[in-house]
Image (tube, rainbow, N blue to C red):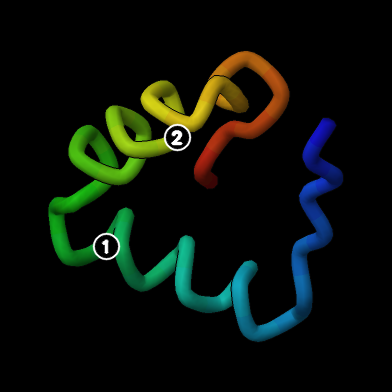
Amino acid sequence: MWKIIYTKQAQKDAKKLSRAGFRKKAEDLLEIFGIHKKVTLK
């Protein structure tokens, strides 16, 4: 079982991904890893 821990830098990077238009692609990757339902990009 994997435990995902998000650092402050990861949260900043998620915002940058979203602003750059990569939100859908990032969410697709999270879904591949099986954690899509637990995490949402803001």
Q: Residues within 10 Å of mark 2 (few under 14, many from 20)?
A: some
Is 7 displayed left or right of 42 in the figure?
Answer: right
Q: Earlier in the sequence, mark 2 or mark 1?
A: 1
Q: State which mark lies toward you, 2 or 1.
A: 2
Residue 34 is marked as none
Q: Position of residue 26 (x, y in %)?
A: 31, 45
| 4 relative to 5, above or below | above
Q: Position of residue 39 (x, y in %)?
A: 65, 32
Q: Amino acid at mark 2?
A: Leu
- The residue at the point 78 percent across, 50 percent down is 4
Secondary structure of the residue carrying numbered label 2:
helix
Is 21 displayed left or right of 40 in the figure?
Answer: left
Pointer 1 residue: 19
Q: How many marks?
A: 2
Q: Amino acid at mark 1?
A: Arg
**Do the numbered discs 2 and 1 sit on residues whose CB atoms are within 8 Å?**
no
- The residue at the point 61 percent across, 26 percent down is 35
| 11 relative to 36, above or below | below
Gap in angstroms between the C-alphas marked 2 and 1:
17 Å
Pointer 2 residue: 30
Quarter residue 12 falls in: bottom right
- The residue at the point 32 percent across, 54 percent down is 18
Q: Residues within 10 Å of mark 1 (few under 14, many from 20)?
A: few
